[in-house]
Amino acid sequence: MEHDPTDFEGEEIAQAEKAVRSKSARDVEDADFKWLMGSRRGRRIVWRLLDRAGIFRSSFNSNSMAMAFAEGCKNDGLRIIGQIHLLCPDTYSVMIQEALDDKRNNC
């Protein structure tokens, strides 16, 4: 089927349908993340991801490419923290306390 550039009504319908699909996908992603943060095991996974992303340490490196890579990793970790604070902020302090408890128990 060819695109008709003068079919404004059809274009509006297509854009509305796309917006509904995008919102539905975001809702599923948000629900998945809340589910993950809803259990101790899930919070341990997220904590490891944050630690590996390097958000708790400096990214400085005299090699600019290594530092750029580290900053890219850190950016992904900050995105995860943003999700936590947006979707389930109460679980952040729980996750930190559990990580501290795990560290004490493994020392």
Image (cartoon, rainbow, N blue to C red):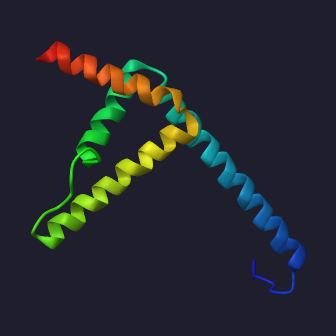
**Up/down of 102 relative to 31, above or below:** above
**Up/down of 97 relative to 64, above or below:** above
The residue that appears at 68% across and 50% down in the rendered structure is: 23
Is residue 85 toward the left or the right of residue 60 in the image?
A: right
Q: Residue furthest top?
A: 105
Is residue 46 toward the left or the right of residue 48 in the image?
A: right
Quarter the N terminus occupies: bottom right
**Up/down of 81 relative to 21, above or below:** above
Position of residue 81 measured from the top left corner of the image (x, y, whole percent): 43, 43
Is residue 59 toward the left or the right of residue 50 in the image?
A: left
Is residue 76 toward the left or the right of residue 102 in the image?
A: right
User: Quadrant of the rendered structure where residue 44 is?
Assistant: top left
Position of residue 95 measured from the top left corner of the image (x, y, whole percent): 38, 26
**Up/down of 104 relative to 27, above or below:** above
User: Quadrant of the rendered structure where residue 73 is?
Assistant: bottom left
The residue that appears at 9% across and 68% down in the rendered structure is: 62
User: Quadrant of the rendered structure where residue 102 is?
Assistant: top left
Position of residue 86 measured from the top left corner of the image (x, y, whole percent): 56, 41
The residue that appears at 31% across and 41% down in the rendered structure is: 50
The tally of labels here is: 0
The residue that appears at 58% across and 34% down in the rendered structure is: 31
> 47 or 61, which is in the foreground?
61
Quarter the C terminus occupies: top left
> 73 or 4, which is in the foreground?
73
